[in-house]
Amino acid sequence: MTAPSRPLPHGARPSPEAPARRFGVRAALAAAAALVAAGPLTLVVVLILTRSSALRRVDASVATSLHSYVSARPALGQTLGVGSVVLHPRVMWVVAGTAAVVLWRRRRRRHAVWAVVTVAVGGALDTPLKELIRRARPVFDTPLTTAPGYSFPSGHALNSMLIAAGAVVLGWSATRGRPWRRTALLGGAALLVLVTGFDRVGLGVHYASDVVGGWLMGLAVVCATTAAFNTGVAPQERDEGEPADPDHRSPS
C-alpha cells in the first residue's frame, strides 16, 4: 500500500521534475488531439477529391436550406454580411497579434511566440490548400453575396478556430478553480466558431464541409503547436506575482 503524499512545508518549492512531467503529459495529449483531428480532416478531403455523391447531397441540401432561410430574412442577411467583415481572418490576426503583445509584456514569452506561430501556420495553410483542392464555391440564382477564390477550406472557419481554441489553451490555467469563468471561456469559444460557420454557409459562400474542414484544420494546428511548444507556464516565464508551479497551492 502506497503511503499518502505529504503537503510541502510552507515556503518549499516542488521538485523541478514535477512541472516538467506535467508539461510532458500536456504535450503528449496535445499531439494525440492533433492526430485525432487530422483523421476526420483527411476523410473530408478524400470525399471532396473523389467527388463523393453522399457528401455532395448533404452539402447541397444544407446550403440550399440555409440560403433560402437567410434570403427570406433580409435583416439576417445584412447582419451576416457585417459578421463576414468582423470575423474576417485579418481581424483574427489582429486579435492574435494584440494578445501576443500583451503576453510578451507580461513576460509570458513562450505563450506570446506560440500564439504568433499558431496563427501564422494556420493562416499559411489556407490559400495553398484552396489552390490544391480547387473546389468551386456554391452557386445560386440569386446570391446573397460573393467571395473570391476557391471554397475548401473556409478561411473564416479556420481562423476562428485558431483564435477560439488558442484562447482556451491560454485561459485554461487562469480559470482553474473558477468554474463560471471556465464555462464562459468554453462557451465563448464555441459561440465564435459556430457563429462563423453559420455566417459562411448562410451567406452561400461555403459548403458545410468547407466549414467543418476549416474547424478541423484549425484545431489540429492548435494542438500540434501546443505539443511542439510544450505550452505551459514555465517558472522563468510566469507573470509577476504568479507561483512558480501553477498547479501547486501553498498550504493555508
Image (spheres, rainbow, N blue to C red):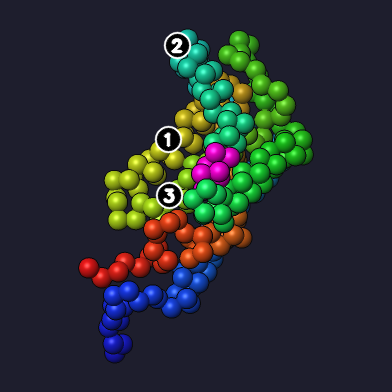
Residue receiving disc 1: 191
The disc, 3 or 2, on the residue closer to the chain's N-terminal end is: 2
In which image quadrant can residue 204 be found? top right
Q: In the rendered structure, which amino acid carries the disc numbered 1? A: Leu
> In the image shown, does 124 or 109 lie closer to the viewer?
109
Q: Quadrant of the C terminus?
A: bottom left
Q: Is residue 250 magenta?
A: no
Instruction: Quote the CA–CA distance across marks 1 and 2.
Output: 20 Å
> In the image shown, does 1 or 16 lie closer to the viewer?
16
Which circle, 1 or 3, is nearer the viewer? 3
> In the image shown, does 162 or 153 lie closer to the viewer?
162
On the rendered structure, is 49 left or right of 160? right
Q: Residue at x 67, y 30 (%)?
A: 151
Q: Is residue 165 visible?
A: no
Q: Position of residue 186 (x, y in %)?
A: 39, 44
Q: Main secondary structure of the magenta part?
A: helix
